[in-house]
Image (cartoon, rainbow, N blue to C red):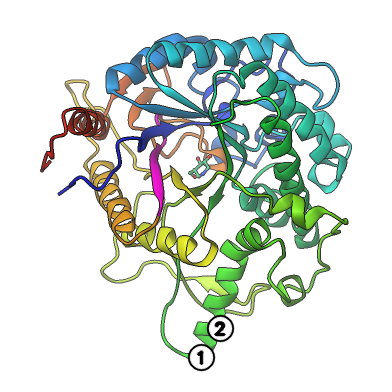
Amino acid sequence: MYDAVFPPDFLWGAGTSAYQIEGAIYEGGRGLSIWDQFAMTPGKTYQGQTGAIAIDHYHSMAADVALMAELGLQSYRFSIAWPRVIPDGSGPVNQRGLDFYERLVDTLLAHGITPMATLYHWDLPIALHQLGGWLRRDTAGNFADYAAAVAHRLGDRVDWWLTINEPWCAAYQGYGDGKQAPGSTDLAEAVIAGHHLLVAHGLGMQAVRAYVRPHARLGLALNLYPVDPVDEREETLRAASMADHFKNRWFLDPIFRGQYPEHLFASWGVEPPPMHVGDAALISQPIDYLGINYYERSVVRAAPTTMGFEEVRGLADATYTDMAWEVYPLGLTRILTRVHRDYAPSLLIVTENGAAYHDVRDTDGTVHDPGRLNYVQRHVEAVGDAIRAGAPVGGYFVWSLFDNFEWAEGYRYRFGLVYVDYQNQQRIIKTSARWFGDFMRAQRLQHREGLVIQQE
Ligand code: IFM
């Protein structure tokens, strides 16, 4: 079922982010972030859960990397916590913070695992939030200084970089619907925050580029969704177009075309963001790859909401994960080929793809996760289909390597290939991880020995 479609240098891996796994929020000179504050605010997360301890990766990093090697992971995507590196967001660099990530990178490399570093996965230092956070343009400049500090230390070893993870979530969920930190509910603010995140991406690209090796690859990761109308009525088709603009084109267009879609903000009844001279070129500077985070498609119908649509769930014949996200592998092929067709990035990497289930330990201590196994297998096939259709896909990362803090949902859903017992921090390799490890090994072997292995 998996023929020789994946090239020898295809990156296979899994990902995490700092606040979701590290814990140790008061250690190593780390400052606090908007996520510490948000999670500690009553009512913001499931049962008031926080990332204060998470899966304690800060203390178990070496063992965690050894586990990655045991699994056969070829590449590991992680994020760097800005408040560990610059506790107040701007100003002095905390060398102990950088030391931690340097140890992580060196341990990965010692195990032959390729590091992919994300610079911003939502943990804005609280001191910057107090100055205005992403509503303040200078935050983008502060981000560039932070990015430079990290790249200065790690640029001689890390060749894969992502500036911002999912600016749509950071902007819209952080400032628009309030589901994420810092929890504002003002669409006009979300639009401004989104623009400043893009400016930060642009400045961050330049800052990192100055310190990395010539062959290093720099990009950012967008969460994208193919959008389908639930029926063929004209108003539904219009709603689907609105949804596509909101979910996809809001960020794709400025990055690849240097401009927001026409009438986008007017259609939401808000002002466009404050564009400075040079912003368009800065934001749309060439990236070496686009990270695509794909989980499900979006099926919509017309509704009297600000964006003119609402999501439709519970479709007959559809299957859903425990988090009620549709399992729709074809959507991954579709989004990859669509981005290739409409925006033509030179390289696409699936930087996140995965499924949340309520996994449990069997009496013998093992964890079987057939839902996730099926999800990952089918999405890997969907990537193969996209490559066959001509999309330049160069990597695939499962989200997530470990069960972890799923933001406002706390610990109630598990995304990991590896199960974590939150009582004692024990790690247990799930069935999906065993399969994925074997699969990665088979891919390597296939290319090393020039074999074509047909895997069942
Ligand atoms: O856990 C998150 C991740 O941090 C960002 N992308 C989506 C994942 C699942 O919700």
Q: Residue at x 28, y 17 (%)?
A: 70
Mark carried by residue 234:
1
In the image, residue 286 above or below residue 449: below
With respect to residue 254, does 362 lie above or below?
above
The residue indicated by pointer 2 is 238
Question: CB under 8 Å between callouts 1 and 2?
Answer: yes
Nearest to the observer: residue 102 or residue 407:
102
Residue 449 in which image quadrant: top left
Instruction: Give whichever of 21, 385 is nearer the camera.
Output: 385
The secondary structure type at the circle numbered 2 is helix
Amino acid type shown at disc 2: Arg
Q: Quadrant of the C terminus?
A: top left
Q: Position of residue 443 (x, y in %)?
A: 23, 34
Splitting the image into 4 quarters, where does residue 63 fall? top left
Looking at the image, residue 223 sits to the left or right of residue 385; the answer is right
Is 177 located above or below residue 115 in the figure?
below
- In the figure, is residue 439 to the left or right of 209? left
The magenta stretch spans which residues? 392-402
Identify the residue at image location x=67%, y=34%: 35
